[in-house]
Image (cartoon, grey):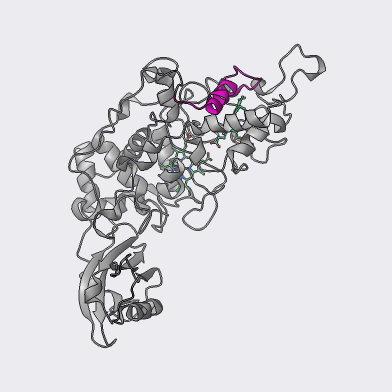
Amino acid sequence: MKRPTNNLLPGLAALAAGWAVALFSASGQLLPAASLGIAPGSFAPGGGMVTASVKVTDAGNHVWLLQSSTNLTTWSEVAALKLHNGSFARGIAPVAAPGLLFRAVYDATRQTIRSDVTNALLLPASPFNYAAPVLPAKFLQPPILGQDNLPATNLTTDIGATLGRVLFYDKRLSTNQTVACASCHQREHGFSDPRPFSVGFNGGLTGRNSMGLSNARWYQRKKFFWDERAATLEDQTLMPIQNSVEMGMTLQALTNRLAAEPFYTNLFTQTFGTPEVTSERISKALAQFVRSIVSTQSKYDMGVTNNFANFTTEENLGRQIFFGQVGSATCSTCHGSDNFVPGANINNNGLENPYVDKGVGALTGLASDEGLFKVPSLRNIELTAPYMHDGRFATLEEVVEFYDSGVVAHPNLSPPLRVPPGNGAASGTPLRLNLTPTQKAALVAFMKTLTDTSVTTDEKFSDPFNYGGDGAGGAGSSGFGGSR
Ligand code: HEC
Ligand code: HEC
């Protein structure tokens, strides 16, 4: 690795030192919510400088004027940067940069660049296919047919789900424009959150663990949230927006804010025929996108087609334990079908007694509902740690240990987790599985066959906003501008 002889690096380092005064308005007033960061670039193997970059962060999505100077007295404009979703990065060719200092300036008279479909979003020329995912044969038959919550009043269209995708990643949905749906439903984590409780727009914590969204379209009871308080997905999608911890927004303020953005009036027109931004349309588009997050390409799905010849011996043992063919585990009773969701019942799986969070019981006030919780599909469960409504288990090993020996007696404990009748005094007490270490590991290995990286890597589920960066790298890159 060779260092260049010019003073490029010291020059850029000085920029970094200048961060604190780097962003100010034309009137000299510092804008506290914004920041300028300089990445000094790095040395490519074999010598040569990789392009340095500046990143402007501003939840207000203003236009910032990037200026350069050699003497801190005379400044000349390099570019006008329009932020589209909280931050924007721009590369600076190293040859042009030696000794240069940069700053970003806010000028109220220059706020004329608008976010439109072409500059704000990195969308394909024709929309991705969301409306007609290729589904395995079993998805078109009972019981999965009966799990489908797609309503006739909101059929998914490619452009509608595209609008939903944009909304899902847009921080404008929170009152101070710092949190998007994707902040708590991160796709690399199976659209869940690696934190036990998610952080809302104002730093507050959610009361429960975020739920993974893979195959949320299929659930026999068709309701949403751990306590099923949302009757439909269309109802659900407006709730986080108005939640005082999560996004803190009113629907009126949201529709006004979105209606002011040309890219939204364009997408609403394409989807619904007219540019009106209404909360009903927002809820429908978001629901279309969430419903389109379909996982059917896991190792398990492949196994279904070849009698699990693609499974290792360990994975096949785990599968037999999960489906009750080896040992006494009853997992598939509650995590059933190829969507790994419960049937007609909502369950209490004996996490504790009494329950700190009473689940459905907190809604109804009934003791007989204490500890009843919906469980989302186990698809992509490897990615959605931590586990349970309160994120109490960090790993699948801990989950298996719990089901093996930790289920707690509770009046509402669901029957599949109790010793069956006819076993004398033991009948009805929490089931103990007595799995061997090998069997426990196999059960974990089986659950990992439900991982489907098409959901976590397919561009159609990624962040569509243009954050600048080095050319094409904006969408979904975890570098600059991600949704967290
Ligand atoms: C601050 C974090 C946060 C934000 C922002 C957020 N969610 Fe959630 N989401 C959660 C948590 C936590 C839960 C579980 C809450 C509960 O059950 O009480 C959840 C549950 C859900 C569910 C239920 C899944 C199921 O299977 O029942 C859906 C769907 C969902 N969120 C979609 C969205 C959408 C769409 C947005 C944006 C409009 C959004 N979320 C914004 C944290 C968040
Ligand atoms: C009686 C029904 C029932 C049985 C049987 C059952 N579960 Fe569960 N499972 C649930 C419920 C309900 C939850 C959610 C509980 C909560 O968070 O309060 C859950 C949660 C989970 C989770 C965490 C899901 C998440 O998104 O955080 C995993 C993993 C899991 N179960 C695996 C298993 C395995 C493996 C077995 C078999 C050893 C099993 N379950 C048996 C009902 C059941």
Judge whether residue 439 is colored magenta.
Answer: no
Q: Is 274 in front, or is 192? A: 192
- Tell me if residue 96 comes above or below residue 356 in the rendering: below
Res. 371 visible in picture: no
Q: Quadrant of the C terminus?
A: bottom left
Q: Quadrant of residue 85?
A: bottom left
Q: Is residue 312 magenta?
A: yes
On the image, the x and y values in percent for residue 470 come to 27, 60
Q: Does residue 423 appear to the left or right of 347 in the view shown?
A: right
> Which residue range is magenta in the image?
310-332
Residue at x-position 79% and y-position 19%: 426
Residue 349: x and y in percent read: 64, 29
Above or below for 457 versus 76: above
Please state, as top left, top right, bottom left or bottom right, where the N terminus lies in the image.
bottom left
Q: Nearer the viewer, residue 187 or 162?
A: 187
Note whether 118 is above or below 300 in the view shown: below
Residue at (60% x, 18% y) in the render? 324
Quadrant location, ligand no. 2: top right
Q: Residue 69 at x, y = what percent? A: 25, 82
- Number of disc labels: 0
Image position of 273 with respect to 427: above or below: below
